Image: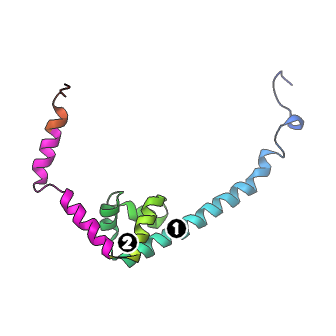
Amino acid sequence: MRVGAWSELEWPMPGRISDMAPMDTALRELRAEIAKQTSHKVRKLRERAGLSQRRAGHLLGGGPRAFQKYETGQVEPSVAVLNLLTLIANDPSRLDELMSADMAERPAYPAFARAHSAAAAAAPSRRI
């Protein structure tokens, strides 16, 4: 044996790495079950709120495909998204608040706003 190498008898961990395979399998199965339950909950809450996947992604954040990914288990939604979705599903009048806030934040002329923000970003900043 070379200097500094561990023999199998001196390995500092209890058991061998191959003994961890059943625990890894169990952990993967548990994670898959949790993802399945979460994705089902997201879909149920979104439908109860009367939102399409695209609209929910726009209003609650994450983009147009976020809820598709949440509901298929590809991505786990944040606790904030789950809480917000729960609040909206329990009190749909809160959705009106989000929609009116969303409309207030949108510029009247989106093309002008994009061009203006691009020009502002390209301009050198002045510090006083």
State the SS at label 2: helix
Start and end of the magenta stretch? 93-118
102 shown above or below 91:
above
**Could you say which is closer to the camera, residue 125 or residue 115?**
125
Side of 56 relative to 117 (left or right): right
Residue in the image at 27% along x and 68% along y: 97
Q: Which residue is mark 2?
A: 88
Side of 26 relative to 92 (left or right): right
11 shown above or below 21:
above
State the SS at label 1: helix
Real-space CA distance between mark 1 and mark 2, rounded to the nearest whole angstrom: 17 Å
Quarter of the image containing the N terminus? top right
Residue in the image at 81% along x and 45% along y: 16
Image location (x, y in percent) of residue 67 = 39, 64
How many residues crowd around disc 2 within 10 Å: few (fewer than 14), some, or many (20 or more)? many
How many residues crowd around disc 1 within 10 Å: few (fewer than 14), some, or many (20 or more)? some
Quarter of the image containing the C terminus? top left
Q: Is residue 77 visible?
A: no
Q: Which residue is mark 1?
A: 38
